[in-house]
Image (spheres, rainbow, N blue to C red):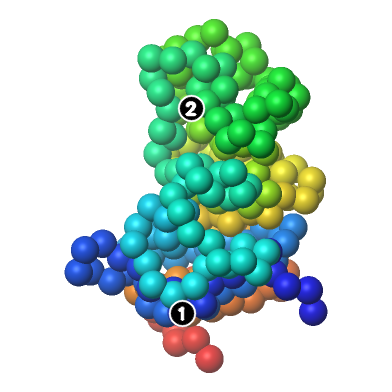
């Protein structure tokens, strides 16, 4: 069996004296889209932050079999890139300047032009607004900038946190259409998403977190959505 691209073993993480994640051992297959679902406070965002070194953690994180350590800006050099929740754009900078910042890792600077055209191909609206201040964009357009900025780093593993949060349904469909295309192109994706139906529509694998622990790990194909929701809302205990 081939070694997974990204894995954790006995991972604990939290904030100060508060532990949020308890001994998570997870495998994220290369080239697959893994959905991380669960209620508020389950530890989904904390997991992504632990993977990118943004919160203290114990246990092991491995990328391609090698221990992973460092901060998000260092890990981007190794191809691990995070698109955070909340559409964090630099409001006073133009759309294109925001995108250029995503190409900061040294390994992808030479391909800035190619990656920029790739982003504009995925999000034609951003090309139309490339000289516009990011702070003047709609919420959906700002989410496109945040996702596009992550793609500018030419990620091997892309962590996406709550891309549908606060967006109109038509924009959600557009964003998830791009996520589906990225998966089909072979990008390994970890997707945190509260909209379980949307998450399952693009996922290969699903991990359900609740209370900082893994309650379910299954392939998305054939997964019973009603059972998933029962576990999600603690109406059923995992076998």
The residue most toward the top is 131
Q: Is residue 198 above or below residue 89?
A: below
Question: What residue is rendered at 39% in x and 19% in y?
Answer: 91
Direction from residue 13 to residue 176 in the image, left or right: right
Question: What residue is rendered at 51% in x and 33% in y?
Answer: 146
Inspect this view and state whether residue 239 appears: yes
Question: What residue is rendered at 68% in x and 49% in y?
Answer: 156
Mark positioned earlier in the residue sequence (1 or 2): 1
Q: Front-most of 193 and 226?
A: 193
Q: Is residue 179 above or below residue 220?
A: above
Q: Secondary structure at mark 1?
A: strand
Tell me residue 40's x, y (percent).
Answer: 35, 61
Q: Is residue 164 above or below residue 145?
A: below
Inspect this view and state whether residue 163 appears: no
Q: Which mark is residue 10?
A: 1
Tell me residue 236's x, y (percent).
Answer: 45, 84
Which of the 4 quarters of the picture holds residue 210? Answer: bottom left
Mark 2, residue position? 142
The residue most toward the bottom is 239
Mark 1 vs mark 2: in front: 1
- Give the crowd class for mark 2: few <14, some 14-19, many >=20 residues within 10 Å: many
Tell me residue 106's x, y (percent).
Answer: 61, 34
Tell me the distance, in whole angstroms, between the alpha carbons under discs 1 and 2: 36 Å
Which of the 4 quarters of the picture holds residue 77? Answer: top right
């Amino acid at each position: 069996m081939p070694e997974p691209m990204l894995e954790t073993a006995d991972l604990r993480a939290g904030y100060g004296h508060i532990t949020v994640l308890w001994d998570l051992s997870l495998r994220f297959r290369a080239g697959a889209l893994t959905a991380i679902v669960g209620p508020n406070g389950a530890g989904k965002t904390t997991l992504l932050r632990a993977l990118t070194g943004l919160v203290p953690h114990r246990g092991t994180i491995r990328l391609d079999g090698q221990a992973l350590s460092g901060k998000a800006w260092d890990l981007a050099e190794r191809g691990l890139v995070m698109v955070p929740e909340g559409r964090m754009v630099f409001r006073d900078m133009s759309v294109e300047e925001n995108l250029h910042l995503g190409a900061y890792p040294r390994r992808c600077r030479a391909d800035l032009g190619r990656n920029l055209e790739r982003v504009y191909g995925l999000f034609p609206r951003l090309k139309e607004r490339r000289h516009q201040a990011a702070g003047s964009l709609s919420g959906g357009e700002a989410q496109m900038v945040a996702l596009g900025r992550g793609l500018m780093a030419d990620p091997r593993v892309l962590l996406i946190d709550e891309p549908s949060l606060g967006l109109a349904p038509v924009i959600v469909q557009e964003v998830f259409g791009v996520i589906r295309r990225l998966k089909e192109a072979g990008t390994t994706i970890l997707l945190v998403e509260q909209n379980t139906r949307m998450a399952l529509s693009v996922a290969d694998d699903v991990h359900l977190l609740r209370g900082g622990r893994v309650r379910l790990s299954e392939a998305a194909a054939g997964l019973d959505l009603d059972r998933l929701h029962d576990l999600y809302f603690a109406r059923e205990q995992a076998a």
